[in-house]
Every structure is written in structure tokens, then in C-alpha cells.
């Protein structure tokens, strides 16, 4: 029997208030839809706010030889051709318009001498392509989108966590959740739902990701019948802080290398000469992360187990102007003045290329009425994302998701939600208060992170991945028994007990896909299969929920049209 809950109704419900969710909301509003935006944290606090380096878009303000085609080619090369080519094409073609639009809505960018939006170099991008505001681009983007959305009039539900999607005859009809502050229940009725919940990094202990990144959106979609795709591709950013321990994993933006930062090992050797003499520090993230990892493993790491990243050869004022957050981050957290000496950095779990499988034009998942955009969606980045391509992804596909969701809402009748589904969602959510065991959600989370770091990390083997499965099975049964004390009033242990389910679901999906992919490609490195396999070049891993059991299938990679293929493959 369900306790009381409040009910809200919208044409389009957007779960997530980061760049993707806000851009989707703006577009759905522009189509005349009534829009609700739900987020776990306060509005303006989404993960997007942390983005530092910039937005990749071929504006051609600095390098006039750039254009959508070179951007497309770099994205496909970075993703090792596993990208959904049509998404990559749309992304490269539409990103400049989305940046210009952001500027028209009030975003302030750094400028060229002629007054155009300034663009900087970044790993894997052939031309200077990243539009930026110092190293605080995400903050400016969120501020602008938020202002615009509020002006147009969406309803915001802050500090509210969605725990289940409600469905009827195979299509989504609403969502169930709770207010984090007081634990009260809420049901949303909606004709279309956009998932924009970001990534999964909190399943690993060393991560640049914030507490919100527990894979909720992917789990909600998976449980509602959507397909997850290419979950094995988890990006370890090469440069996170390795010291002091309390901030281990915190991101050191690629903009440091974009502005000329040099990587050295403890012997002072510029080791990227060995691994990628052409691109050096601006090689793709997978290559730089593996290079640092190898230097450390072979005994050439720094005192705290990383590499040195040095920008101190640049004038101090330049560093402070271009990298203000990095300057303060190191000064305040590690007592290091980066204008005078090197930083210590090492790989950190940063981004997931896999996610909800969507259709390129509309961002619709395999479930009618359910859309996904941003880091929660798969396809654009293939096996490895280029820096800067996420912020442009949020703008391009956030807009498309909002547009298609609003159009879909016009075609379906008002939603009916199932009381039985609501009762089941409530039972599951409240179970930790009545579970008889003493299992702590914090202990389960700590052990999950240890398993993912040691067995499903930057380098993988069949033996480790099989061990990971056995461990994940045990963790799942421990998580199901997790119990919490106290009331529903802001109770972080209870919130974590709920988030564990999502983290375990996405962890299993990553391990299952990683075991199957018997090759190394992009961010997926198998020590036992170190080379590309042409057979796997043609296949995506698909994860589906079959009667409550996680099952893996394969699906062919779409062929690029011949003219694009010829351009992309040309030297
Ligand atoms: C430190 C850092 C720097 C980065 N720098 C760059 C950069 O310079 N350029 C670039 O392109 N990319 C960068 N990235 C990556 C990029 O920031 C992210 O991929 C992107 O911001 C994700 O945006 P999003 O809209 O998909 O999700 P987010 O911005 O994370 O938003 C997710 C939203 O979903 C909500 N949510 C989650 N679960 C639930 C739930 N169950 N119920 C309700 N709400 C929920 C959250 O509260 C939040 O509002 C960086 C990442 C990090 C960590």
C-alpha cells in the first residue's frame, strides 16, 4: 500500500539539469511544451559546472583551415571509428551554431584580438577549436542556459531524485522519485522523458566526477527496457591530482597541456616522445593516460605515484590568466605554485563513452517517448571522447532531444501511471529502513570502488574481469540487504543505499561488455588482447534487461557513406 505522494504533470519531463538537460528544456519550451526539470542537487550545481577546458566547435576563428569535416574526422579518429557516424556528423556541423546561440543568450567568451570567440588547442584536435572562458567554461555555460530556461519558464524540482520510470504498454508515462531533504514521495506524469543524468564515475574511487555520477539515468532506462551500448568504454583522464590524498582524482584540465604544459617522469624525461612523437602531450586521452600509467608501473613515477606536468616555463601572469582555477586549486589544496614548479598528476576515471543507445536525429532511445542526451547517451564518441566534445555534445543533442521530446508529446494522449508500479518503487526505496541486517551502504560502496579500480580499471584481463563478476554478485546481494538508521529527513546513508543499485547495474554492464570485447580499442585496454581486432571494429556491445537478467547482445556498426569514409580515412 503506497503512502501519500504528490503528483505533477508535464508534457516533457527532463531528468538532469546539466548542460544537456537545460538545453533540452529550452528547446522543448520553445516548441510550446510544458516542461519540468528534476535534479538531485541545486539548480546550477550540475556536473557541467566543473567543465574547464572549453567547447569544441569548428568556428574557424583562430585556424581558418578548420571546418566541420576536420572536426568530424578528428572525432571519428579519436573514437577509433566506433562512433555513430551520423551523430558525429551532426555534432560537427551544428556545434558552431550552438556556440553562437549561447553567445547571443549572454555567454561571455575569451576573445581574439579582432573580438571573435577565442579558441585553444586540445588533445586530438587538429586545429585550435575549443571556445573557452579561461578554465571556467562549464560555469559560464550553465549560467547562460539556466538564465535562458528560467526566463522561458520551466518548473524546477531541485534536490529530488528519480528512482524509477513508469511505463504503460512499452512506452514511458512518468517517473517516481523522492525529495532528498524530507524523503517525501513524488510522482511525475509525462508524455515524453529526457534522461540527462550524466555519467558513472562514482563506481571508481579515483575520479574527477562529482557525487551525482552514479549511473542513475542509464539504470532507469535499462530497467524501463532501453538498450545500453558500448559500456566498456570508460575514459581515464590522464591528469588528475595524485596528491594530497583527500583530493586524489580531482581534474587537472587538459587546457594545461593545451596551453603548452609538458609531461616528464621522475628522471626529467619528456616521455611522450616515446609513445606519440607526433602529438606528444596533445595525443588523445587514452594514449596519454596509458603512457603515464606505464611510466609509473615501470618505476619512473613521481614521489606520489604520478608524472610531472609543468607549465612554469610560461609567464606567471599568462598562467594565472589562462588557468586561474588550476592556479588556485594547486595553491590551496597542494601548496604548489604552478607558475614556479610542476604539478604531480595521474590517471583518474573521468567520462563514460557508453550509455543509453539513441537514434542520431532525435536522441530517442529504443523505448518510445524516452530520450537521452549528454553523457548519459552513447554513440557520438565511439571508444574514446576528445576533450571539448562533451560540452558541444550537450548543446547539439540536448537541443535535438528537447525538440523531439516536445514533438512526441504532441502525438500521445495524457499519461496514466500504474499504482502497482508506484507501490513497488516505494517498497524498494524504503527497504533499507526495514532490512534486518547491519550491512552498511558505505562499506558496500567502498568495496565496489575497490573492485572496479583493481579489476575493471585502465588495463583489463579476462581473469580480472571474471573475478570482478564474482565480486559484483556478492556486492549485489549485500546491497540488497543494506540497512540504514534514522528517519527519511536528509539521510545520506539512505540516499547512498539507493544509488548503490545504479552503480552496481552500470558496473556489471561495464564488466560484461569489457569481458566480451577481446581487443584493445580507444579507452578499452585488454592486456591479453593488446591489438585492434577487425571483427570488433564492426560491432557494438548492447546490454539489455531480459526478465530481470542482464544480457549482452551485439549489433553492427553503421557504415559511413563512401564520400565521408574516403575523407576520414585519407592521411
Ligand atoms: C572536472 C571536469 C572537467 C570537464 N571539462 C570538460 C571540458 O572542458 N569540456 C568538455 O567538453 N567536457 C568536459 N568535461 C565533461 C563534461 O563536463 C560532462 O561530460 C558534462 O558536463 C555532462 O553533462 P550532462 O548534462 O550530461 O550531465 P551533468 O552536468 O552531470 O548533469 C547531470 C544532472 O542529472 C541530475 N541527476 C542525476 N541523477 C539523477 C536522478 N536520479 N534524479 C534526478 N536528477 C538526477 C544531476 O543532479 C544533474 O543535474 C569535464 C568533466 C569534469 C568532471
Image (spheres, rainbow, N blue to C red):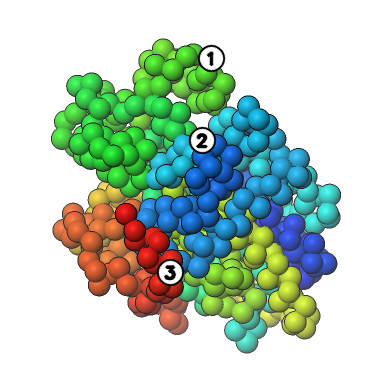
Decide: is 159 above or below 508: above
Mark 1 residue crowding within 10 angstroms, few (<14) / some (14–19) / many (20+): few
Given residues 55 and 232, the one toward you in this image is: 55
The quarter holding residue 139 reads top right
Badge 3 density bin: few <14, some 14–19, many ≥20, Cα 10 Å: few
The residue labelled by disc 3 is: 563
Is the distance from the Cβ of mark 1 to the nearest ligand 1 atom less than 8 Å? no
Mark 2, residue position: 120
**Disc 2 secondary structure class:** strand
Can residue 498 be seen here?
no
Q: Position of residue 494 (x, y in %)?
A: 56, 53
* Extreme residue toward the bottom, this view: 169
The answer to which of 318 and 460 lies nearer the viewer is 318
Q: Nearer the viewer, mark 2 or mark 1?
A: 2
| Residue 132 position (above or below residue 69) | above
- Residue 476 located left or right of residue 154: left
Locate residue 435, reporting x and y percent: 50, 62
**Whole-number angstrom distance, CA of label 3 to CA of label 2:** 29 Å
Residue at (73% x, 61% y) in the render: 27
Residue 317: image tag: 1
561 relative to 391 in the view: left or right: left
Q: Quadrant of residue 406?
A: bottom right
Q: Position of residue 431 (x, y in %)?
A: 55, 64
Amino acid at each position: 500500500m503506497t503512502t501519500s505522494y504528490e503528483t505533477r504533470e508535464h508534457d516533457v519531463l527532463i531528468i538532469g539539469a546539466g548542460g544537456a538537460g537545460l538545453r533540452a528544456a529550452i528547446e522543448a519550451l520553445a516548441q510550446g511544451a510544458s516542461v519540468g526539470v528534476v535534479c538531485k542537487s541545486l539548480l546550477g550545481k550540475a556536473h557541467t559546472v566543473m567543465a574547464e577546458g572549453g567547447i569544441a566547435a569548428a568556428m574557424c576563428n583562430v585556424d581558418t583551415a578548420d571546418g566541420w569535416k576536420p572536426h568530424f574526422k578528428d572525432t571519428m579518429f579519436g573514437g577509433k571509428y566506433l562512433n555513430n557516424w551520423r551523430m558525429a556528423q551532426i555534432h560537427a556541423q551544428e556545434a558552431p551554431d550552438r556556440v553562437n546561440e549561447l553567445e547571443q543568450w549572454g555567454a561571455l567568451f575569451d576573445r581574439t584580438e579582432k573580438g571573435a570567440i577565442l579558441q585553444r588547442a586540445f588533445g586530438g584536435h587538429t586545429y585550435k577549436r575549443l571556445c573557452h572562458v579561461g578554465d571556467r567554461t562549464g560555469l559560464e555555460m550553465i549560467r547562460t542556459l539556466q538564465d535562458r530556461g528560467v526566463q522561458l519558464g520551466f518548473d524546477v524540482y531541485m534536490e529530488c531524485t528519480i528512482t524509477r520510470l513508469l511505463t504503460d504498454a512499452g512506452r514511458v508515462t512518468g517517473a517516481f522519485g523522492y525529495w532528498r531533504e524530507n524523503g517525501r514521495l513524488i510522482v511525475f506524469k509525462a508524455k515524453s522523458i529526457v534522461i540527462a543524468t550524466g555519467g558513472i564515475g562514482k563506481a571508481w574511487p579515483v575520479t574527477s566526477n562529482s557525487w551525482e555520477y552514479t549511473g542513475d539515468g542509464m539504470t532507469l532506462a535499462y530497467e524501463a527496457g532501453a538498450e545500453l551500448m558500448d559500456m566498456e568504454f570508460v575514459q581515464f583522464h590522464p591528469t588528475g591530482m595524485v596528491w594530497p590524498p583527500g583530493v586524489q582524482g580531482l581534474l587537472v584540465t587538459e587546457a594545461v597541456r593545451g596551453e603548452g604544459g609538458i609531461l616528464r617522469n621522475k628522471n626529467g624525461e619528456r616521455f611522450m616522445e616515446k609513445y606519440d612523437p607526433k602529438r606528444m602531450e596533445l595525443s588523445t586521452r587514452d594514449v596519454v593516460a596509458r603512457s603515464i600509467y606505464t611510466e609509473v608501473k615501470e618505476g619512473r613515477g613521481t614521489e606520489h605515484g604520478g608524472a610531472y606536468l609543468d607549465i612554469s616555463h610560461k609567464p606567471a601572469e599568462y598562467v594565472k590568466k589562462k588557468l586561474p582555477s588550476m592556479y588556485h586549486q594547486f595553491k590551496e589544496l597542494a601548496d604548489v605554485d604552478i607558475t614556479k614548479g610542476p604539478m604531480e598528476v595521474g590517471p583518474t576515471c573521468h567520462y563514460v563513452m557508453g550509455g543509453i543507445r539513441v537514434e542520431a536525429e532525435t536522441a530517442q532511445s529504443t523505448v518510445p517517448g524516452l530520450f537521452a542526451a549528454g553523457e548519459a547517451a552513447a554513440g557520438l564518441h565511439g571508444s574514446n571522447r576528445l576533450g571539448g566534445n562533451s560540452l558541444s555534445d550537450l548543446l547539439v543533442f540536448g537541443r535535438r532531444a528537447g525538440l523531439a521530446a516536445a514533438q512526441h508529446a504532441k502525438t500521445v494522449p495524457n499519461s496514466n501511471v500504474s499504482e502497482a508500479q508506484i507501490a513497488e518503487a516505494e517498497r524498494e526505496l524504503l527497504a533499507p529502513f526495514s532490512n534486518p541486517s547491519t550491512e552498511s551502504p558505505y562499506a558496500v560502496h567502498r568495496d565496489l570502488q575497490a573492485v572496479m579500480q583493481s579489476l575493471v580499471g585502465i588495463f583489463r584481463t579476462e581473469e580480472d574481469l571474471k573475478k570482478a563478476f564474482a565480486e559484483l554478485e556478492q556486492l549485489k546481494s549485500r546491497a540488497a540487504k543494506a540497512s540504514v538508521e534514522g528517519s527519511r529527513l536528509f539521510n545520506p546513508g539512505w540516499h547512498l543505499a539507493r544509488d548503490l543499485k545504479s552503480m552496481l547495474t552500470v558496473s556489471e554492464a561495464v564488466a560484461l561488455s569489457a569481458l566480451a570485447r577481446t581487443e584493445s580499442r580507444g579507452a578499452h585496454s585488454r592486456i591479453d588482447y593488446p591489438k585492434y581486432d577487425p571483427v570488433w571494429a564492426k560491432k557494438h556491445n548492447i546490454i539489455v534487461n531480459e526478465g530481470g537478467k542482464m544480457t549482452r547482445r551485439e549489433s553492427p556498426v553503421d557504415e559511413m557513406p563512401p564520400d565521408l569514409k574516403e575523407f576520414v580515412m585519407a592521411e
